[in-house]
Image (cartoon, coloured by chain):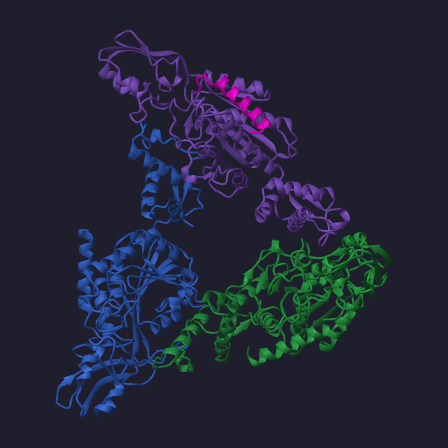
Chain colours: A purple, B blue, C green
Amino acid sequence: MSNLESEIGSKLYEFAEKLWPFNRSLTGNGVRQTLCAIKEVIPGLRLHEVPSGEKAFDWIVPKEWNVVDAYLITPNGNKICDFKMNNLHLVGYSIPTRVNLRLEDLQKHLHSLPDQKDAIPYITSYYEPRWGFCLSQNERDQLIPGIYEVHIDVELVDGSLTYGEILLPGQVEKEILLSTYVCHPMMANNELSGIVVTTYLAKWLSEIDKYYSYRIVFLPETIGSIVYISKNLATLKKNIVAGYVLTCIGDERTYSFLPSRLGDTLGDRMAMHVMKYIEPNYKRYRWLDRGSDERQYCSPKIDLPVASIMRTKYGEFPEYHTSLDRLDTVVTATGLAGGYNLVKKVLLGIENNYYPESLILCEPQMGKRGLYATLSQKGSAQIHRKLLNVLSYCDGNSSLLEISDILEIPIWEAFDLIELLFGHQLVEKLRK
Amino acid sequence: MSNLESEIGSKLYEFAEKLWPFNRSLTGNGVRQTLCAIKEVIPGLRLHEVPSGEKAFDWIVPKEWNVVDAYLITPNGNKICDFKMNNLHLVGYSIPTRVNLRLEDLQKHLHSLPDQKDAIPYITSYYEPRWGFCLSQNERDQLIPGIYEVHIDVELVDGSLTYGEILLPGQVEKEILLSTYVCHPMMANNELSGIVVTTYLAKWLSEIDKYYSYRIVFLPETIGSIVYISKNLATLKKNIVAGYVLTCIGDERTYSFLPSRLGDTLGDRMAMHVMKYIEPNYKRYRWLDRGSDERQYCSPKIDLPVASIMRTKYGEFPEYHTSLDRLDTVVTATGLAGGYNLVKKVLLGIENNYYPESLILCEPQMGKRGLYATLSQKGSAQIHRKLLNVLSYCDGNSSLLEISDILEIPIWEAFDLIELLFGHQLVEKLRK
Amino acid sequence: MSNLESEIGSKLYEFAEKLWPFNRSLTGNGVRQTLCAIKEVIPGLRLHEVPSGEKAFDWIVPKEWNVVDAYLITPNGNKICDFKMNNLHLVGYSIPTRVNLRLEDLQKHLHSLPDQKDAIPYITSYYEPRWGFCLSQNERDQLIPGIYEVHIDVELVDGSLTYGEILLPGQVEKEILLSTYVCHPMMANNELSGIVVTTYLAKWLSEIDKYYSYRIVFLPETIGSIVYISKNLATLKKNIVAGYVLTCIGDERTYSFLPSRLGDTLGDRMAMHVMKYIEPNYKRYRWLDRGSDERQYCSPKIDLPVASIMRTKYGEFPEYHTSLDRLDTVVTATGLAGGYNLVKKVLLGIENNYYPESLILCEPQMGKRGLYATLSQKGSAQIHRKLLNVLSYCDGNSSLLEISDILEIPIWEAFDLIELLFGHQLVEKLRK
């Protein structure tokens, strides 16, 4: 890692540590705490509250869920499955419960993973009233027979669903969308990583001159994006030219891409172009492998050009949806910085994806502009050659992305060449 | 074979046995006997008679040919090459002849196969007046010198060419064409198989509700399809959306496909889709390998979307065009049932090739419809996943065939999924 | 080689020998001598003079350069680097110089190739005033210390740039362009070969009936084509349907193709089709490998469909741009005849690239036209089959090139088949 990478890595990691303990879910104060912490980094963030019971297409905003306390008392009087120790212990959206049960009756409310004996699984039951506790198989195996006290002190009442949104205006109304989700409790790659990377990308974008406008949203998954789309469909369809769901973007294992449903949008092509140069062996999924909010953004008649950029994809790493998806082991400062820098390169690629047009007919005389050594030398000839190669495609109809792909160079290299030609008044930088 | 397959196999085989002895040729009573037997299975069949001498594009309907008797008498007084024993013995369209010849002069009228010594070859001379006999090389080798009596008692007179046609109306005028040929005498795969399979497909189609109309024709090859096209060109061009020549469709060796000239019509794509799932190693020919009536249906400016579905293609099996292409060895009940069921699946594919359109925006809430186990279980998750995959392409612009190919499932599986979505009012089934 | 090939090979070679000694450069009398010699073969050639200082897009026509004499006198009084012995000895566009220098000061004006010790390199300095001599490394290594007399008696004055052009009218205004360059001194493959092959192609084209018109130009490279385009842009854009730069087309090593920038024009496809049959292992370059006047013809907004046909490409053979690129070793009569015949076949391909349309519906009855043996024989069946295959694509929308590619036969074979069908009034030969 360069110093700059190390610096952004540290910031992302510290921010993740700060957000770690909040009890994120579909709704509730954990979401609000998370969004308020994000707002400290990007003050322009606006929080929206959507009341329980409001309809959004086929869906209804659920009741708001807040946990006061939750635990079990064993026959020996020990407190176990303590929500305050790890918020994964309580099944998400568990209903308020105060009951004493024999172990054999309690068992059907317990969830563990026989194959990962030291992992607490992540379980929710948003739309079916239930209660339950999650614990490691090791801990479960040691439960002794007898009567257990179940304490689930939660509020499940009409309230609201909360999401955050920031619009960063550029030169044009056309927008790039970034979307991540704020409903996952104490897990690091899936999903604190998306939140912290997206927050700092928003911060960076708020500080630079931009051609495109940027729409950045922090939502609970599925119901959140559905609610958001239902409230903003016309604007989204009018403005969005590319978008990415950012998720599972903080580990160091690989880089992964999942295309939009249509699969050949500008956002798809730019992300794959950049990833090819960042990590030639990046993992490329199909639309059929999808599983996050691109399911909504790309659904028929919504049809937004939204792909997913990830490091190791949800469902594809052993710690997925368990307490093993930790901030200190799975997600690292280096992993987060890698994800952040990848997306930055992709966004810069879209920002600078001109359709350059030559300002003169036939080749220019490079020599009189000092762009061609009059006595040929090795390095100069190569740059001169690349300049003429780029220029030979500056017909006003080829994007810099297309030109880069033909020349088999990363778009940032092509951009440097275009700037050089632009500086010598040899090309215009058109937009389409 | 399932019981159902075994049942249809037996019916097809029995029908083939019934048609076996008729002396089919370009014209004549053998064709009429064949068509009358077909009419017993599908009473709606209409027989058409086209008089000798009538013009059809570049061609003229030939004289009608009927055989009374034909044989040779050897110097020893034995009757050989007896047409009544096997109608392959007489060269098709042999002219009337009564002459005595020495063996050496007779030889140039005899046809046998040195490489298949026990096979009687199938030879015709439709457009050049000739006479001749076909016999096995073994029999020929035993002919003794001396005088032979040639008896060819045939009528070759102005009469008519006969073909059969049935139109089975569906909900729309758009038609699917099935075409097979009735001009080949005692040979089983090429060509009793096409006749019997097409007859029973017509019977099945006459008994079901159909979206498309069906046009099913039983013709002599080449001249028959040319005559038919010349009489029906405007209607065919207006209505036919897909069509198949059915030939060599009764053996058990493989399945084969030969595309239409354009090669990428609905009929081509559907047949290849279905065949891929029925027999992954099916044989795929090119247009340049063609050899039956698709030559006419697909010719320039006729341009009908007609492909060929076969089991082992004409010219590609050793018994082809000889007496060895037998009903008891080459063609079997199992082979016929396989061909019949393949075409049925192809036709059902076209019938059900909707352009489904989602009726709601974003993903539906599957749980409240019982389409999503609230506690996930293995099998249910898979169906739920497939349902959402199909639904994600229900944009009203993608056919079920295209969706099936993307999902890599057979179209009949996609159809079941669409019916389930349709039953829950989640999709409309559009047509295009 | 056939006799015919041997004959054209000898003519080409003799013509090359005649042009060999002229001191070709960007401008000057060596170019005029070359063009006058070409005019003796093709009297219609017009010489154009463009005055020094005239602007052409980004460029200015340079002064005219003519050499009276140039050599060095060694301390021993020997004459070396004598321009009259080999015109490569003098750096192209050397300025007039008469000076005495010590060897150590002379060295920076000398050019040799340490890796090719017996080769005189080819060096020019068109746009930067310089002088210099080129010699073999072997000769240079033997230079003794002392004072050298430098004699460079040249004229570098306002004059003109000279190019040759001939227009050969065909039935239509649409044109095929052939372009080669006349600025290289004593080197054979690069570039006497292009001049002699193009001259004799022009001669051949002037003697035959043509559908297309032909525009054939002999120019100094780069500045010549830029000047020519600047003077003729509207006409070129209106008329040119295909074009080729002919260069390095006289050795025997291989055949090479370099596409136009767009890469899929008629000229590209026809050249690749023909080359595939002439030499299956021909070398196919990319646009990025370009290096001759296609750089100008294909530049953005000029966009002419001009590809390059070569034997061994400039830069790709060891003798390139040295005195070793000789007429007696590198370039041969056989090599020149091969290049000439290849281009001829390409041009005939374009000339005969009809869109044939069948004049009858369905297949014709081949038998009544004698195109189908009534008793089948091996050879006749193959031709009959090919005839029907070609005919099956005669829909008026498929070019003979496309049909040939589908049938996997060379276009000249398809042309013979079309002529046979045309002779029987079975097809029309349409143009598009």
Viewer-proximal residue among A77 and A27: A77
**What is the x, y in percent for residue A1?**
55, 29
Quarter-of-image position of residue A158: top left
The percent position of residue A371, horizontal first and vertical second, equals 73, 47
Task: Indicate whether C398 appears above or below C337.
Answer: above
| Above or below B290: residue C424 | below
Residue C70 visible, this angle: yes
- Asked if residue A17 lies in the magenta stretch, the reply is yes
The answer to whether residue A138 is left or right of residue A422 is left
Q: Left or right of C126: which side holds A325? A: left
Q: Quadrant of residue C197?
A: bottom right
Residue C399 visible in the snapshot: no
Query: Residue B389, located in which quarter of the rendered image?
Result: top left
A289 or A120: nearer the eye? A120
* Magenta-drawn stretch contains B224: no
Residue A20 as seen in the image, left or right of residue C47 = left
Q: Return the residue nearer the eye: B336 or A1.
A: A1
Up-down: is A34 above or below C286? Answer: above
Instruction: Name the residue located 38 percent from the left edge and 30 percent from the top edge.
Output: B365
Q: Position of residue B194 (x, y in %)?
A: 27, 65
In this picture, residue C277 sits left or right of residue C26: left
Which residue is farthest left?
Answer: B77
Please count the marks in the image.
Answer: 0
- Tell me: residue B61, above or below residue A7: below
Q: Which residues are magenta?
A: A1-24
Q: Position of residue C250 (x, y in %)?
A: 62, 69
Which secondary structure dominates the residues rendered in magenta?
Answer: helix
Choose between C425 and A80: the one closer to the eye. Answer: A80
